[in-house]
Amino acid sequence: MKNETFSISEFAKATGVSVRTLHYYDEKNILKPKRDEHTGHRIYEKEDMIQLHKIMTMKFLGMSLDDIKDYMQPDTFDLSFIDTLRLQESKLVKDREQIDIALEAIQRTVHLLENEKEVDQAVLISLLASMQNEKKQEELSKGIIKDEVMKKMFPQTAKEKMVVEQGLLTFYKQVREHCGKPADDPEVKQMLDDFYHLILGIFDMDSLEELGEIFSLDLEDTANEERLDAYVEEIERLIPTPITAEEEAWLEQITTDYLSPLLEEEEGEN
């Protein structure tokens, strides 16, 4: 490049940056070239090329144009730039975590849709909300759920999570199909058998009595009851229920009818 100065089109061609982008940088006072005093046309110099590379490098680091603008005038970087880089590093790490969560959620959702072909909107949104808020659920559960149970409650691999989600999807689908039937209806009984088999499998437990012992809190303490209620309310805020009020009331009734004799039987055996 023998030219000492460049028109905007020449500068764009030499740097690979579009004329439109150069206009934008000029308007934002990030890279302002000189102007021909007669024509008003922009005139770029070799120094502008260094400044443009400075912009592109900081963009590569993920910095916003507003942040970049603050660093365009000084000819050197001092120790204060370390703080900027560290803040940017934290932001990029957080962004990467969010991207990883979204990518896994996409994979798990594709798996469900491929198996089911069609999924109820409310159910899918509920499952996606659960995927999105897994870390928050885990944080909320600390001190509420026993540590050894937590490891099983929040599996680490996508494959394990898919098994649980497929089971929940099937359960919600059946709730919608069988709502209104009595607890002793064969299809309803099979639905509940399958659901509790899924839950016991998740926690690696053999009985419903064990399932009632997953809490690390003493539930006879009134203060702990209030803490548990607050925990449940927060989980429900994060994850919308996919079933209607009518379905929820029915499910509560048939679950009571289903569990009572099973729990009595287990107590008798003990």
Image: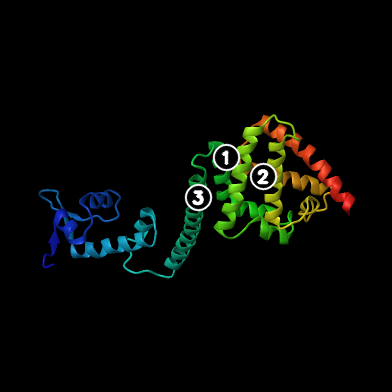
Asked whether, in this view, residue 31 is left or right of residue 214, the answer is: left
Foreground of the two, 81 or 106? 106
Foreground of the two, 43 or 269? 269
Label 2, on which residue?
A: 234
Asked whether, in this view, residue 261 is left or right of residue 205, the answer is: right
Q: Residues within 10 Å of mark 1 (few under 14, many from 20)?
A: some
**Nearer the viewer's eye, disc 3 or disc 1?**
3
Q: Residues within 10 Å of mark 2 (few under 14, many from 20)?
A: some
* Secondary element type, mark 1: helix
Mark 2: which amino acid? Glu
Mark identifier at residue 111: 3
**Nearer the viewer's eye, disc 2 or disc 1?**
1
Location of residue 206 in the rendering, given as x and y in whole percent from the top left corner:
76, 56
- Distance from disc 2 to disc 3, alpha carbons, whole Å, reads 28 Å
| Vertical side of 176 occupied by 110: above or below | below
From the image, which quarter does the C terminus lie in?
A: bottom right
Label 1, on which residue?
A: 123
Mark 1: which amino acid? Val
Mark 3: which amino acid? His
Which of the two discs, 2 and 1, labels the residue nearer the N terminus?
A: 1
- Distance from disc 2 to disc 1, alpha carbons, whole Å, reads 19 Å
Look at 39% across and 59% down and name the residue there. 62
